[in-house]
Amino acid sequence: MGVAKKFAVLLCAEDSDYVKKRYGGYYGVFVEMLAEEGETWDVFRVANGEFPDDDEIGDFDGFVITGSCNDAHGSDVWICRLVSLLKKLDSLKKKVLGICFGHQILSRALGGKTGRSMSGWDIGVRTIHLSTTSSKLLSSLKIPTTLSIIECHRDEVRELPPKAEVIAWSEKTGIEMFRYGDHMMGIQGHPEYTKDILFHLIDRLTQRCYIEDSYGEELKGKSETVEPHKEAWKKLCTSFLKGRL
């Protein structure tokens, strides 16, 4: 029998009471999507300063970086510490999957540039297009070359790290996904989200006056009629993280 694989979620957000109660926090959301039988999954609440020790990093087969309310281009102590950790994981060729903020901070750590999106908030279910090279790479997964995904962000990767490759784009965002070597991948959207989580976040954004109430209702209305390709995203993310691509 092989040794059980071990993964960690680097949690960059505070769990809302709703997400904690319904899903066991964002850690629970990611485990639901990515965990397979026989694996061990840990969580490090990096936004609270909780990081893996240097001597335990080698025990993990892969890491997932979550979304966050913070800016990936910020200079908070924990963000700078996370950048250092990601550089270390790159040098060790550890598998790393970055989601939303995680996608942006991964790009920053590898030498790319992030910042506010030129086109404003992107919230809802959006269609993204796999690049020609990536669709060949992913052909073994038998997934569509256009995929719907839930988005909720106002920052973006503006410039790719050197040697990184764009593997998906949308009409709103030029770098929806990128790949760096065989071990690091970023996804701007949220393959782990349900529409229930999206609507919860829209409510929180309106309550905090980030978006107008009327715009929030409009976004919900538009999102009601379309579904994200959750199973295809699950297959893509697990295949990458577990080295099956």
Image: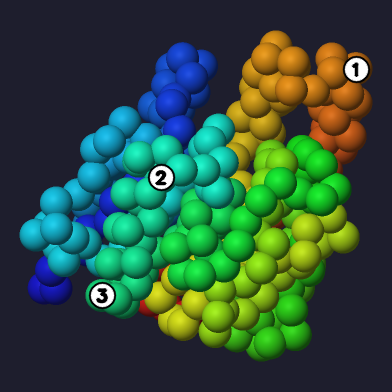
List the residue tagged with mark 3: 92
Which amino acid, by three-letter code, is at mark 2?
Ile
Q: Position of residue 18 (x, y in %)?
A: 51, 16
- List the single residue furthest toward the top: 207
Left or right, residue 242 beside residue 139: left
Please tell me in which quadrant of the rendered image residue 202 appears.
top right
Please name whichever residue, 31 or 205, is drawn nearer the observer in this view of the structure: 205
**N-terminal-most mark, 2 or 3:** 2
Q: Secondary structure at mark 2?
A: helix
**N-terminal-most mark, 1 or 3:** 3
Say whether residue 187 is visible. no
Which amino acid, by three-letter code, is at mark 1?
Ser
The answer for how far apart the CA atoms under marks 2 and 3 are is 20 Å
List the residue tagged with mark 1: 214
Which amino acid, by three-letter code, is at mark 3?
Leu
Q: Secondary structure at mark 1?
A: helix
Quarter of the rendering occupied by the N terminus:
bottom left
The residue shown at (82%, 42%) is: 120
The residue shown at (71%, 46%) is: 116
List the residue tagged with mark 2: 79
Crowding at mark 2 (Cα within 10 Å: few <14, some 14-19, many 20+): many
